[in-house]
Amino acid sequence: MKKKAVLIIIFVIALFVTVNNMKSETPKDDAFFISQAKNTGLTLVMVNNYDSAIEYYNKALAIDPNDSECYYWLAIAYSGKEDSAQALNNFNKAIELDPKYIEAYTMRSELHRKMGNQDLAEEDLRKAASLKKI
């Protein structure tokens, strides 16, 4: 049941991301492709096909390497593969591009916790909480 709730939340976030990306400054065709690649990637993540999801996210990033949401979803896919190093790199990049990305801090915190880095996990949770207050 918890997995279904998480999948629903991910789907809603993906729709939000898609709408926001359509407002980007990339050409319309590129914005549409990026949106489709992210939606396809999300669908693939939901069925645990992480390698294919990663391919789609990388295709989107080839067009717009400054898409923080795409790095976030790429990190989620790598987390699903249990590739903590790649997941961490991509969460870091998402946060570098968008220092107010609350979800990225929250998920990076969870990754730090799994990696045994409790201090870093708590630091990210504090940062996410401070951003929610703004």
Image (tube, rainbow, N blue to C red):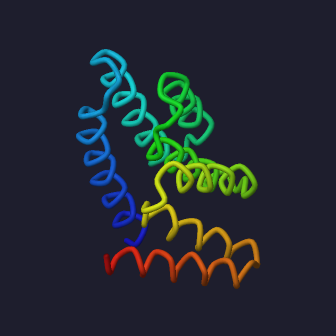
* Residue at 68% in and 51% down: 89
Using the image, determine if residue 110 lies above or below residue 104: below
Residue 60 at x, y percent in the picture:
48, 28
The percent position of residue 117, horizontal first and vertical second, equals: 74, 78
Image quadrant in which the N terminus is located: bottom left
Q: Quadrant of residue 27?
A: top left
Residue 76: image location, x then y, percent: 55, 53
Q: In terms of depth relative to the viewer, which is nearer, 45 or 130?
A: 130
Residue at image point 67% right, 57% down: 88
Image quadrant containing the C terminus: bottom left
Q: Residue at x 53, y 24 (%)?
A: 59
Image side of residue 110 versus residue 36, left or right: right
Q: Residue at x 65, y 53 (%)?
A: 87
Is residue 80 positioned above or below 27 on the image? below
Answer above or below: position of 35 versus 12: above
Name the foreground residue: 19 vs 24.
Answer: 24
* Residue 17, quarter of the rendered image: top left
Residue 37: where, in percent of width, then height?
Answer: 42, 29
